[in-house]
Image (cartoon, grey):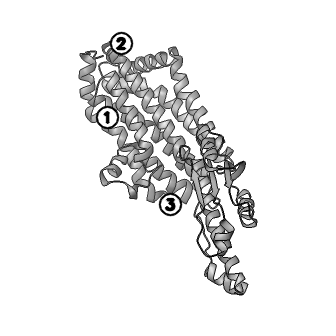
Amino acid sequence: MITRYIGQSFKRGLVQLVRRPMYFLLIVIMPLLCSWFLMDLIKSGSVQRVPVGIVDLDNSVMSRQVSRTLGGFQQVNISKRYTNFAEARDAVQRGEVLGFFFIPDNLEELALGGRQPVVSFYVNYAYYAPGSMQYKGFKTMSLLANGAIVQTALRTVGVPDRKIAAALQPYQTHVHALNNPFTNYNYYLNSTFVPCFLSLFILLVTAFALGMELKSGLSRQWLRTSGNSMFLALVGKLVPQTVLFTVVGWFIQWMMFRCYDFPLNCNPWNMLIAMFLLVVANQSFAVLMYCFVPNFRYGTMLCTLLGMVSFSFAGFSLPQESMYSWVEALGFVMPIKYYFLIMVDQALNGVDLYYSRFYYAALIGFTILPMLASWHLKKECLNPVYVP
């Protein structure tokens, strides 16, 4: 009897999956398209040659040297030159350039006279990554210009070059970026954003599949096909989706580690198992939300909201050390947080699997939680009340 109920439930879930083209779109097409777009967007490693402008009111030897040095940076590309501040500001507002460097009048005269001229730069942070590249380039140029001015002033009073170099740079620093020596933004950003996008799709599809049973009033029929077993009903409905999402997740990992050469310093099976557990954990998390809020609109909204905020609360865009304690704790509620920690430990750091055992156990734990509250969802399925 159990085998028959499993077969009936699985057949019903598979038929519903095939009949709705939207499932194929959200399970296969959109995750792969988003993953390819994000990874191919910065496949060179970082955003480079951001179009910027420059306003040179001095037109001296020193200001032209500053312009040439700034144009040699990889981060920025001086595509426009403007005659005044207002013209450059309007260009930024129109989107012609994403920022501009402002050299004031009498720069050389004030600098050589020791009267500290002010060099300004303006950055459009509406686009975060290009804005960061601009800021880095402009800031470096400001420091170099300051050093060049001091160097010129000291030379005019007869200070030897060796003493000038010791005064401007008393010591040298060597930066060694562990596990990402090339400071590749593709490794840094997409190793977290791409799995998080996949998690969001898993939450949405699972929430939609469960909500449609309640909204359409077919929840009793759904339970009858599984012999009134909530566990068998959930297994039959979600297993076909689990298979598709897992295959898509493994294909995304293949793109990351083979096509785009993301660091993989562990046994590939460690990450393949982590991806499977991530899929099942997110499905279980959506089921758990429906156990508490068995309503199509509210359940779907809750899964969407938690899936979106996990981009920030899980520590992708803001370090957890900088968060409020309650926000940091909320990040550990989402399954993607533990996949992120596995990615860092296994793929990037290559530590022994033993030290990541708690993260794998946490993902497995998410699959157990819905079983403890499924009785409430079964009660709602037996007595469906549609709330618009």
Residue 3 visible in the displayed image: yes
Q: Residue at 61% across / 53% down in the picture?
A: 133
Q: Could you say which is closer to the camera, residue 38 or residue 131?
A: 131
Q: Which amino acid does label 1 sit on?
A: Pro
> Is residue 136 placed above or below 365 in the rendered structure?
below
Q: What element carries label 1?
A: helix
Question: Crowdedness of circle 2 by 10 Å Cα count: few (<14), some, many (20+)?
Answer: few
Q: Where is residue 160 in the image (x, y as percent from the top left)?
A: 72, 87
Closer to the chain start, of discs 2 and 1, is 2
Residue ID for mark 1 = 370
Tell me, for residue 352, which label it has, or none: 3
Q: Position of residue 320 (x, y in %)?
A: 40, 55
Q: Which residue is drawn at 40% across and 47% down?
A: 313
Q: Where does label 2 land, which residue?
A: 216
Q: Distance between the residues labelled 1 and 3?
A: 31 Å
Q: Is residue 90 above or below residue 49?
A: above
Q: Quadrant of residue 127?
A: top right
